[in-house]
Image (tube, helix red, strand yellow):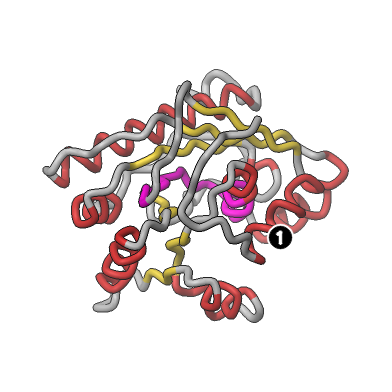
């Protein structure tokens, strides 16, 4: 599937090219979208987060759709050799959670949106602590997504992804085993683009609405990879 878009920035980054090249070797990626979805310039792309593998899945899906967003991610990734330099060079935004610098990320993201860039953000703000590989609805969202949408007056495009836990989940040993065997298993992974929405001004209501929209997109993705009905509720 190809989602036709006209983003302000058409540059192909090393990060997105790498993800787009690697993911087909580790799984079978499919993409769907709501009818007529056309992410505008300066949109916030809000996704569910349940695996260390899902950022690569999402970036590969967005690359295929012609979208190359600025990514908001935990600041610890900037300390990883090679990856940290790449994230810094491409202008992605570190989030220093629980520190006085946490607000800086929202300021940088707002500035990027005013320049016409897309922002990719995880509303949950972290990974679940589950050890199994099954899908589950997104955890409750933090308020950062709603505050960013309010500050930038930007629309939110809900993204649901499922199947990444089949590549990597559980303990470190299980994660390594999953990544090592994925090229043989090639599990199905799916990303669904929901319809863009404008969040209300009230931060609490906006957070709840964003969570509901991303959860709905996740349900569609979970059905696409045939997750058990009990998981996709």
Up the image or down, 120 lies above or below 77; here it is above
Callout 1 secondary element: helix
Residue appearing at x 70%, y 37% in the figure: 29
The answer to whether 208 appears left or right of 127 in the picture is left
Residue appearing at x 35%, y 32% in the figure: 213
Crowd around label 1: few <14 · some 14–19 · many ≥20 (10 Å): some
Q: Is residue 217 visible?
A: yes
Residue appearing at x 53%, y 32% in the figure: 192
Tell me where residue 1 sits by quadrant.
top right
Which is more toward the observer, 191 or 134? Answer: 191
Q: Which residues are magenta?
A: 42-59
Q: Is residue 55 magenta?
A: yes
The answer to whether 208 appears left or right of 137 in the picture is left
Residue 124: % across, % down = 38, 49
The answer to whether 75 appears left or right of 196 in the picture is right
Residue 20: % across, % down = 70, 51
Kindly give the residue lying farthest to the top in the view shown.
229
Which residue in the structure is indicated by mark 1?
18
Q: Is residue 130 magenta?
A: no
Which is more toward the observer, 52 or 68? Answer: 68
């Amino acid at each position: 599937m190809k989602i036709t878009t006209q983003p302000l920035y058409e540059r192909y980054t090393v990060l997105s090219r790498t993800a787009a090249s690697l993911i087909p070797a580790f799984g079978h990626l499919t993409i769907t979208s709501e009818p007529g979805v056309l992410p505008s310039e300066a949109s916030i792309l809000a996704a569910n987060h349940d695996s260390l593998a899902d950022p690569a899945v999402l970036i590969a899906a967005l690359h295929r759709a012609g979208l190359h967003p600025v990514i908001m991610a935990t600041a610890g990734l900037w300390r990883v050799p090679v990856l940290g330099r790449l994230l810094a060079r491409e202008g992605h935004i570190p989030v220093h959670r629980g520190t006085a610098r946490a607000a800086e990320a929202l300021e940088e993201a707002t500035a990027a949106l005013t320049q016409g860039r897309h922002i990719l953000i995880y509303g949950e703000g972290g990974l679940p602590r589950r050890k199994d590989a099954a899908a589950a609805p997104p955890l409750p969202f933090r308020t950062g997504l709603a505050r960013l949408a309010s500050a930038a007056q930007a629309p939110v495009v809900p993204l649901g992804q499922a199947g990444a836990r089949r590549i990597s989940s559980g303990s470190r040993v299980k994660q390594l085993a999953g990544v090592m065997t994925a090229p043989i298993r090639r599990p199905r992974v799916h990303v669904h683009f929901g319809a863009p929405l404008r969040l209300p001004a009230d931060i609490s209501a906006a957070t709840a609405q964003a969570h509901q929209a991303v959860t709905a997109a996740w349900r569609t993705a979970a059905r696409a990879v045939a997750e058990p009905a009990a998981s996709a509720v």
